Image (cartoon, grey):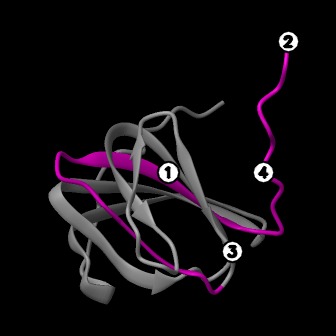
Amino acid sequence: MQVFTFDRAEHEVTGDGSVSLHATRIAQFAEQARATCLAVAPGGVIGTHPAVSHQVLLIVAGAGWVAGEDGAPVPVTAGQAAYWAPGERHTTGSDTGLTAIALEGGPVTIFAPETA
């Protein structure tokens, strides 16, 4: 077993018009999938860019918004996630700050909520 910290904000990201965004690479799975921790500071934005592969953004703390091809912001908060298909242009931002885990790779299946 190995225990490690993933909220290290190691790299500032400024590409695609990103503002107040820090990323920490977490893991790569046999070149099929990777996980990255993204910290968006208050007022920060992950600039509009195309998804390189299937992408799931898990909001783990804070709140903000996500947008797809149409650019319309959709509010998100901790416990919610967004999915973008390969090539889909998208962006994320927050007025108050958020932390998210980006999972990229594919193909991917998004599960519906389980019923009791």
Cα separation, mark 4 vs mark 1, equals 15 Å
Work out which quarter of the rendered image holds the C terminus and state it. Answer: top right
What numbered label is drawn on residue 101? 1
Give percent across and percent down for residue 15: 30, 86
Cα separation, mark 3 vs mark 4, equals 12 Å
Tally of numbered tags: 4
Disc 3 residue type (three-letter): Ala
Give percent across and percent down for residue 73: 38, 63
| In the foreground, 39 or 91 | 91
Frontmost of labels 4 and 1 is 4
What numbered label is drawn on residue 85? 3
Q: Earlier in the sequence, mark 4 or mark 2?
A: 4
Residue identifier under label 2? 116
- Decide: marks 4, 1 in contact (CB < 8 A)? no
Residue identifier under label 4? 110
> In which quadrant of the rendered view does residue 63 lie?
top left
Q: Earlier in the sequence, mark 1 or mark 3?
A: 3
Residue under the image location 48 percent in, 79 percent down: 70
Cα separation, mark 1 vs mark 3, equals 17 Å
Q: Is residue 54 magenta?
A: no
Residue under the image location 68 percent in, 74 percent down: 85
